[in-house]
Image: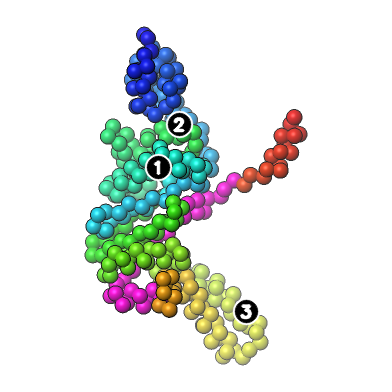
């Protein structure tokens, strides 16, 4: 069967692959476009599997919020390079994914990957694999956070594409919620209040502070006051309610939300690649290895 330009164009439209790759697949399938599509998907899956172990620590943080501000989702999608994270195909995948997840409300990452992402009913995982095959890099949907607030609002903030925050608020308004989300991005608290901080973290810090205070040689009564004072400062520095508001350092977050009769129920902070061990390339060692091999 003759492989026409129209047939190649149709296959490109369905798979997003290059012209020569489409023509080759059509030749091998003797012009059967359905067989060519299936073969290319199998090939794409194989390529995706081969790339799945490669470190993907770049990417974007995406946030999608419902029109009434009561539902929101934040997702981290990773790529191997910052260049691919700015590519149109990658951005389109991210935008469609965030809308689909907000609507689908999946319970976990496996459920998210099984959601239908396009009009053809293809799952997030199938579309991801096709994107890996097309772009040539490992792409991963790493994590997501859904927030729902029936009696309040959800504020969000993105600092570029790499940092995202969400704050769930009861009372107050959207302006306050967005201000708090921006504050979380800037100050990075570890918990809403001191009561929410891990006991292990507090005990470790108290031990350090107590040791430093004892080394001062001051009386025991003074040492106890020093420890309590430093612990109070430590807790305020890393808990949201105790921090000074970034827009007005003279006001604490606790005082700010108190003035608005609001309550912070929860917050979430994402940063691209956070906690992923990146491969460090040593250019000098690479050159030496090449020189020895030549």
Residue drawn 29% across and 64% down? Answer: 174
12 relative to 51, above or below: above
Q: Are the residues flagged by discs 1 and 2 in contact, CB closer than 8 Å? A: no
Residue drawn 56% across and 50% down? Answer: 277
Query: In the displayed image of the protein, which residue is found farthest to the top?
Result: 1
105 relative to 46, above or below: below
Q: How many neighbours does mark 1 have within 10 angstroms: few (below 14), some (14-19), or many (20 or more)?
A: some
Residue drawn 42% across and 35% down? Answer: 131
Magenta segment boundaries in residue numbering: 252-279
Q: Is residue 267 magenta?
A: yes
Residue 91 numbered tag: 1
Q: Say which quarter of the image contains residue 31.
A: top left
Residue 234 visible: yes
The residue under label 2 is: 133
N-terminal of the two: label 3 or label 2?
2
Quadrant including the N terminus = top left
Q: Nearer the viewer, mark 3 or mark 1?
A: 1
N-terminal of the two: label 3 or label 1?
1
Q: How many labels, in total?
A: 3
In whole angstroms, how far apart are the C-alphas of marks 3 and 1? 51 Å
Quadrant including the C terminus = top right
The residue under label 3 is: 212
Residue 225 numbered tag: none
Q: Nearer the viewer, mark 1 or mark 2?
A: 1
Badge 3 marks a residue whose secondary structure is: helix
């Amino acid at each position: 069967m003759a492989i026409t330009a129209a047939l190649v164009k149709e296959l490109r439209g369905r798979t997003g692959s290059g012209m020569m790759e489409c023509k080759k697949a059509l030749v091998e399938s003797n012009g059967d476009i359905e067989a060519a599509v299936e073969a290319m998907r199998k090939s794409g899956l194989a390529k995706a599997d081969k790339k799945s172990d490669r470190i993907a620590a770049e990417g974007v943080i995406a946030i999608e919020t419902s029109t009434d501000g009561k539902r929101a989702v934040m997702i981290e999608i990773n790529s191997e390079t910052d260049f691919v994270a700015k590519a149109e195909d990658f951005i389109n995948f991210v935008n469609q994914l965030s809308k689909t997840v907000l609507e689908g409300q999946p319970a976990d990452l496996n459920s998210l990957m099984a959601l239908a992402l396009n009009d053809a009913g293809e799952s997030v995982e199938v579309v991801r694999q096709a994107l890996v095959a097309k772009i040539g890099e490992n792409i991963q949907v790493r994590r997501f956070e859904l927030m729902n607030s029936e009696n309040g609002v959800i504020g969000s903030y993105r600092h570029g594409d790499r940092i995202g925050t969400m704050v769930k608020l009861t009372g107050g308004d959207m302006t306050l919620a967005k201000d708090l989300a921006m504050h979380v991005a800037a100050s990075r608290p570890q918990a809403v209040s001191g009561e929410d901080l891990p006991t292990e973290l507090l005990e470790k810090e108290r031990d350090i502070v107590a040791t430093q205070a004892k080394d001062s040689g001051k009386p025991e009564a003074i040492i106890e006051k020093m420890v309590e004072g430093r612990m109070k400062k430590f807790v305020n520095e890393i808990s949201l309610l105790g921090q000074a508001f970034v827009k007005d350092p003279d006001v604490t977050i606790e005082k700010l939300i108190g003035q608005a009769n609001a309550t912070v129920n929860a917050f979430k902070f994402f940063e691209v690649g956070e906690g992923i061990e990146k491969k460090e390339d040593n250019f000098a060692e690479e050159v030496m290895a090449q020189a020895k091999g030549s």
